[in-house]
Image (cartoon, rainbow, N blue to C red):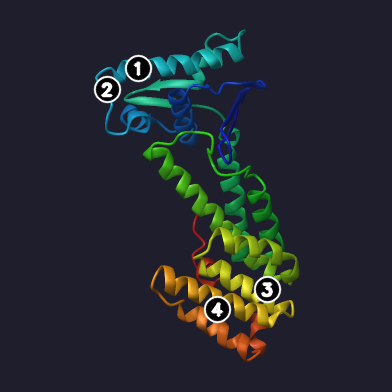
Amino acid sequence: MQINILGPLEAEIDGVSVVPSATKPRKVLALLAARMNTITPISQLMQEVWDEEAPVSASTTMQTYILQLRKLIANARPNDPVSAKRILVTMSGGYMLSGPADALDQHRYEQLVRHGHAALRVDDSVQAALLFRQALGMWRGTSLVDVEQGRPLQAHVIRLEESRLHVQELCIEAELRLGHHQMLLSELAALTVEHRFSENIRAQFMLALYRSGRCAHALETFRQFRALMVEEIGLEPSARMYRLHQAILGSDPSLDEWQSSPDSLLALGAA
């Protein structure tokens, strides 16, 4: 079985898709996939499908959705009639999608991120950048973008997207340490549009511009960011951003050693 949730939902068994077309069974499969090898309580599945407005027949309807999913699995393995119940397992109080851990792309992504963190801890920027790029390369777009999401799935997707941004910041940090500032300019320009209020991304862009000989552009980037923060949030940029701005104004030699995202590097938690 192969399941991918770092983008549109994909679930295949022996090359045959087992993703239902109907909205609600699709939501059930997506949540079971996101929690692969972990029991998902029936109450959580019901919340995903109906939020707080589950009908009286919800338990029976949920059993129907599970049977529909098992039928798709069984059709993918017509010569193994018991495989459906081994893969989609009924547990006490819930259900579990069972399979090898590496069958889920999220698991492989998080494993690469953990190895990247380990490389950063020993100051191996080359290996860290390589591992983080491999992890980011696994994304095929917004997680579960083709699934109508209830609150449980929304929470999972938000966590994944926050992890993705964090890994992007760490990857860029490692590559800035390697002197790849010019190669990062187009990527950072796009990220500042996508994540308008991210100080880490903005600081990395300013630093890459300065190191690429574009001091005026770096200062203008700060001016635009400050205007955005003041006008839309009513807050000034952090003291760290002002220190970077002043260092650029004074062409401070220490900018060649500036760590653009120290906070993220000090908090090397799991993805």
Mark 2 vs 3, N-terminal side: 2
Q: Which residue is mark 1?
A: 61
Q: Quadrant of the N terminus?
A: top right
Is the residue under label 1 in contact with that under label 2 (CB below 8 Å)? yes
For the residues marked 3 and 4, what is the alpha-carbon distance in whole angstroms? 16 Å
Q: Residue at x 49, y 76 (%)?
A: 226
Indicate left or right for 16 with 157 as reference. right
Indicate left or right for 51 with 16 as reference. left
Q: What is the x, y in percent for residue 78?
A: 61, 8
Dot 3 alpha-carbon crowd within 10 angstroms: few under 14, some 14 to 19, many 20 or more: many
Which residue type does callout 3 highlight?
Ala
Which residue type does callout 4 highlight?
Arg
Dot 3 lies on which element? Answer: helix
Is the residue under label 2 in contact with that under label 4 (CB below 8 Å)? no
Which residue type does callout 2 highlight?
Pro
Q: Which mark is residue 55?
A: 2
Quarter-of-image position of residue 260? bottom right
Dot 1 lies on which element? Answer: helix
For the residues marked 3 and 1, what is the alpha-carbon distance in whole angstroms? 55 Å
Quarter-of-image position of residue 59? top left
